[in-house]
Amino acid sequence: MPERLVYEHTVEGLFVKGLARRISPAVKQQLRQAGLDLDCKLLPAYSFDTWARCVAIVAEALYPNELQSVAYQWLGARMVEGYRETFTGRLMFRVLQLLGPQRLVARTEQNFRSGNNYTEVRHTDIAANVVELCVNEPGPTRYVVQGAMLETLRAARPGDLGVRVDLIDFTAESVTFRVSWTEGA
């Protein structure tokens, strides 16, 4: 299996755009020591291990009183917000807004694969407005994925208060989410 890589625009979406002005000099130094130098041009890709270490650093620094799962979900949402400001993200979200939620969820693997080289997704339609997704995301970064998926659906379905992404099961190497939205809204 090739090394898991997270691409530059995903890193930019979270650490440069999504967390702009929220990262202190001390946290920047910790990130630099972990392999992410925000004062230099970003690399084309970062190892998954570097990504996971850097996510852990900012989660602890920015949300020290939150459960890790909640802090990571917030970072996933911030990543999507920031990613939407990148060139690649602007293009992708134009397409996503044209899709209905069923097709958007069915494209989850493609959407995540634009930001890394490893995501694999199996989806099962449960109802017209409910889908189960099994994603090969290891460890606590599963919650970043959860927050990112929720923010993506909210962006695609503004005003739909029924949008949910619930974690229903996980192993060391994968996670299963139940994704739902208000039918016909």
Image (cartoon, grey):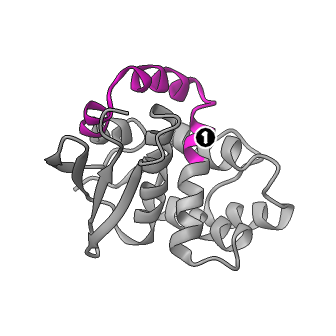
Expressed as whole percent of the image width and height from the top left, the position of residue 78 reads: 62, 49
Is 124 on the left or on the right of 39, as rendered? left
The residue that appears at 55% across and 75% down in the rendered structure is 68
Quadrant of the image occupied by residue 153: top left
In the image, 120 versus 176, the foreground residue is: 176
Which residue lies at the image location 77% right of the left edge and 65% below the top edge?
A: 27
From the top left corner, tell me how far across and down residue 108 is, in percent. Answer: 31, 41
Looking at the image, residue 112 lies above or below residue 132: above
Dominant secondary structure, magenta: helix
Magenta region: which residues? 79-106
Residue 43 in sight: no
Q: Which of 153 and 142 is in front in this view?
A: 153
Nearest the eye: 64 or 23: 64
Q: Can residue 70 be seen in this view?
A: yes
Q: In the rendered image, which quarter is residue 132 located in?
A: bottom left
104 falls in the magenta region = yes
Residue 121: percent from left, percent from top: 22, 49
